[in-house]
Image (spheres, rainbow, N blue to C red):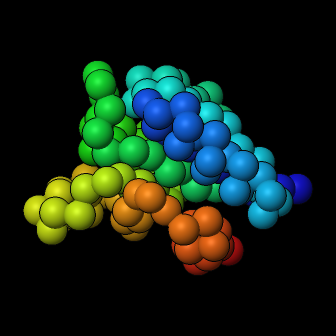
Amino acid sequence: MAKTILTVDDSKTIRDMVAFTLRNAGYGVTEAADGTAGLAEVNRQKFDCIITDLNMPGMDGLALTRAIRGSALNRATPVLLLTTEADPAKKTAGREAGATGWLVKPFNPDKLVETVKKVCP
């Protein structure tokens, strides 16, 4: 059975690119357009990995990551932040929220797949 990945981003283009890349690598992908929709998915099913944008309207990626860490179903699920931010303070905030890793947009498809394989073998 394919591993399942949740991708959360307010940009449909980014969601499409992430989903295309991961589906081609054999993963099942669920998409959510913002943090609130992402949290609803997290509370609905177990994922093998969650990839979220940092800057989104409403619930941002840090708030979503903290909520995921509070969810019994996905508490230990790897969370990768995929963002345009490269500020060390933002990375520290991501780690403190419980993020497993950090990827910078625009992303390299091979690097994305390699990172996902590393955090959810």
Residue 68 position by quadrant: top left
Q: Would residue 70 be seen by someone viewing this image from the given angle? A: no
Residue 37 spot, x, y in % from top left? 49, 23
- Closest to the observer, 116 or 15: 15
Q: Toward which corner of the image does residue 64 lie, by quadrant?
A: top left
Q: Is residue 1 left or right of residue 13?
A: right
- In the figure, 29 relative to 96: above or below? above
Question: Can you say which quadrant of the picture contains the N terminus?
Answer: bottom right
Residue 16 pos. (x, y %):
63, 40
In the image: residue 71, left or right of residue 46: left
Q: Quadrant of the C terminus?
A: bottom right
Q: Nearer the viewer, residue 89 or 95?
A: 89
Position of 44 with respect to 106 (left or right) is right
Q: Residue at x 32, y 32 (%)?
A: 56
Q: Is residue 79 above or below residue 13?
A: below
Residue 49: in sight, yes or no? yes
Q: Nearer the viewer, residue 107 or 5?
A: 107
Q: Residue at x 53, y 43 (%)?
A: 14
The residue sitting at the left extreme is 89
| Above or below 54: residue 118 | below
